[in-house]
Image: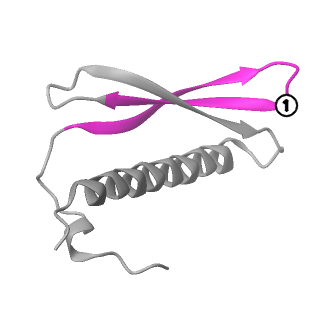
Amino acid sequence: MATIPDHLMPQDGLTDSSIRWYGMEIMHGTGVVRFFFAINNEEKEKIADFHIDIPNGGAGVHAMIEEAHRRMNDVLRQWLYMNEVMRQSYEPKV
């Protein structure tokens, strides 16, 4: 696993916003199950939806839910990486 710089280490209590899985939909005829995540602000209001499509491989619902969460973690890591790249582009050059 990659080393995480100190300024990117997670901390508890920074925000009350959240990302939560709230549902799934079988996409009939496609072999895909769509999992929905709500992105909520600090007032617990849903500000966006994000969906992850998982192949319905017959491994069971729990395995698909776990895979959807794993893929959401990958999306969050990508967002964090791209946000850090943008932050670094504004960092003063010494």
Residue 5 locus on image (x, y percent): 28, 76
Q: Residue at x 39, y 36 (%)?
A: 20
Give neighbour class at mark 1: few <14, some 14-19, many 20+ (Cα, 10 Å): few
Which quarter shows the C terminus? bottom left
Dominant SS type (magenta): strand
Q: Residue at x 12, y 51 (%)?
A: 14
Q: Quadrant of residue 68?
A: top right
Q: Which residue appears farthest toward the right when viewing the image?
A: 29
Q: Residue at x 77, y 31 (%)?
A: 32
> Would you say 20 lies left or right of 75 here?
left
Q: Observer-nearest residue: 13 or 63?
A: 13
Q: Secondary structure at mark 1?
A: loop
Residue 9 locus on image (x, y percent): 25, 69
Q: Quadrant of residue 39?
A: top left
The residue singled out by tag 1 in the image is 31
Tag 1: residue type?
Gly
> Would you say 1 lies left or right of 38 here?
right
Residue 88 shown in magenta? no
Q: Observer-nearest residue: 77 or 28?
A: 77
Residue 20 shown in magenta? yes
Q: Is residue 4 above or below residue 66?
A: below
Q: Is residue 41 above or below residue 67?
A: above
Q: Quadrant of residue 57?
A: top right
Q: Which residues are magenta?
A: 17-39
